[in-house]
Amino acid sequence: MTSIEVRTRAPRTETRSDQNEDGHMPWATRALPQPDPATCVTWTWQPRTPADVTALRHELQDAVRRARVPTGLDDEAVARLLLAVEELASNGIRHGHPPVGVRVVAAPDGWLVDVTDAAAAEPPTPAIGRDPAHGGLGLHLIAGLSAAHGWAVAFGRKHVWACIRAVTA
């Protein structure tokens, strides 16, 4: 990515308990990307309830359309962003510890979605082997639609993040 640099770790060869059946670790520990503030627009929220997440989604949709970056957006790109924000923010409220913070950084090539909570010792745990009717597939969904994703602990808080491209590669 041009303005949101993402560094990934070398693949592991041993089997871990958090790997799914194909050996993929959807939410590995990775450093939070640091976008260049000179080229970005940042929005923040502190949702407390699922209703707050719905309101956040509507506010973000309007803000993204008015922002100077990224340019040339299509409805599909905005839909991917809104889905990522809603899934990660909802997970933060349901499974994290308050306060939950949501930060969306718009860069020239896409968005960084960073959801933080006070449960620094509790990593995001994707559902593995669960009946889809019972939910819990949001992290897998976000892993599939993001250009990069991960989680980290910074300043005593857990950060679960995803980078969403403005255009499909």
Image (cartoon, rainbow, N blue to C red):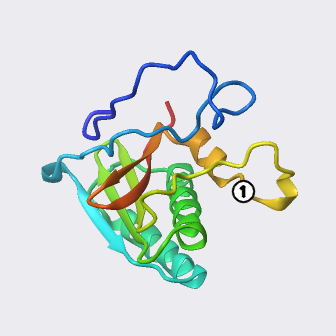
Identify the secondary structure beneath mark 1: loop
Q: Where is residue 71 in the image (x, y as percent from the top left)?
A: 33, 49
Is 57 placed left or right of 130 in the picture?
left
Q: Where is residue 117 in the image (x, y as percent from the top left)?
A: 42, 67
Give whichever of 99, 65 is nearer the camera.
Answer: 99
Which residue occupies 28% across, 45% down?
Answer: 108
Is 25 placed left or right of 39 in the picture?
right
Give whichever of 15, 127 is nearer the camera.
Answer: 15
Residue linked to disc 1: 136
Is 74 placed left or right of 155 in the picture?
right
Q: Where is residue 50 in the image (x, y as percent from the top left)?
A: 59, 79
Residue 29 falls in image quadrant: top left
Q: Where is residue 140 in the image (x, y as percent from the top left)?
A: 65, 45
Query: Which residue occupies the extreme top position in the image?
Result: 13
Whether residue 43 is situated above or below residue 4 in the rendered picture: below
Give whichever of 62, 138 is nearer the camera.
Answer: 138
The amino acid type of the residue labelled 1 equals Gly
